[in-house]
Amino acid sequence: MAKFQTCLSTFFVTLLFSSLVNATFYQTISPTLLRSREKLTHIRFYFHELITNEKPSLIIIDPPKVMSNSPLPFGSLVVIEDPLTIGPDVESKRVGKAQGFYLSATQRPGLDLEIVMGMTLTFLEGEFNGSSLSVLGRNEIINPVREMPIIGGTGAFRFARGYVLARSVKVDYHKGDATVEYNVYVYHYSSTTSSSHDYFTEGLQFMTDPILNKI
């Protein structure tokens, strides 16, 4: 009898372990549910770097310990919180902010700057208020127009993909102040219909097997 009870206990332990391993904690969703609502949006705004301002919008947190005639020597690390406005005048209506960092990534001397930027563009006005785009890419400042990829987003920009074109409007290479026009082209999903969360089951379903509810 004792041997039978031991075997029975082993059986239930094995069954319980198997149920835990096979518990459903994910859900497969057809991409067509989202693709039917995909749209392309163009957004234009102006990005301002303010160095000579009373409250600078960027700071060099790791200046390299090398002699250089470049305003941003190779290896410099900069953190930014730059205002985004609707027009080229920094006093025009503010529509968002850029927060992130960039690295000086060229060893060439002088004003021929190349940086790698990683930043979040957060919108504070209009249809996209509270939503953000994530940008990561190479920015060769000396070029008239630079292209950087959009790698994601939040809010109205979930599953975002696209690119930004940055065009310098006004730059003081010695003081650091700059105004840059940004044209954003982004694929995302319409915010006028139900949220993409509607297609996801709320929470992770770890307890879907009836035997687990008895634990």
Image: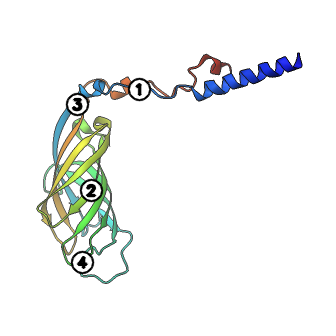
Q: Are marks 1 and 4 in contact (CB under 8 Å)?
A: no
Q: Depth-wise, is mark 2 or mark 1 nearer the camera?
A: 1
| Label 2 Cα neighbours within 10 Å, binned few <14 / some 14-19 / many ≥20 | some
Which residue has dot 2 on it? Answer: 137
Residue projecting furthest to the right: 1
- How far is mark 3 from mark 2, CA to CA? 24 Å
Residue for point 47% across, 28% down: 26
Which residue has dot 4 on it? Answer: 70
Residue type at tag 2:
Gly
Which residue has dot 3 on it? Answer: 38
Q: Are marks 3 and 4 in contact (CB under 8 Å)?
A: no
Q: Earlier in the sequence, mark 2 or mark 1?
A: 1
Residue type at tag 4:
Ser
Residue type at tag 1:
Thr
- Please provide percent x and percent y for residue 56: 29, 65
Q: Earlier in the sequence, mark 4 or mark 2?
A: 4
In the image, is 145 to the left or to the right of 73? left
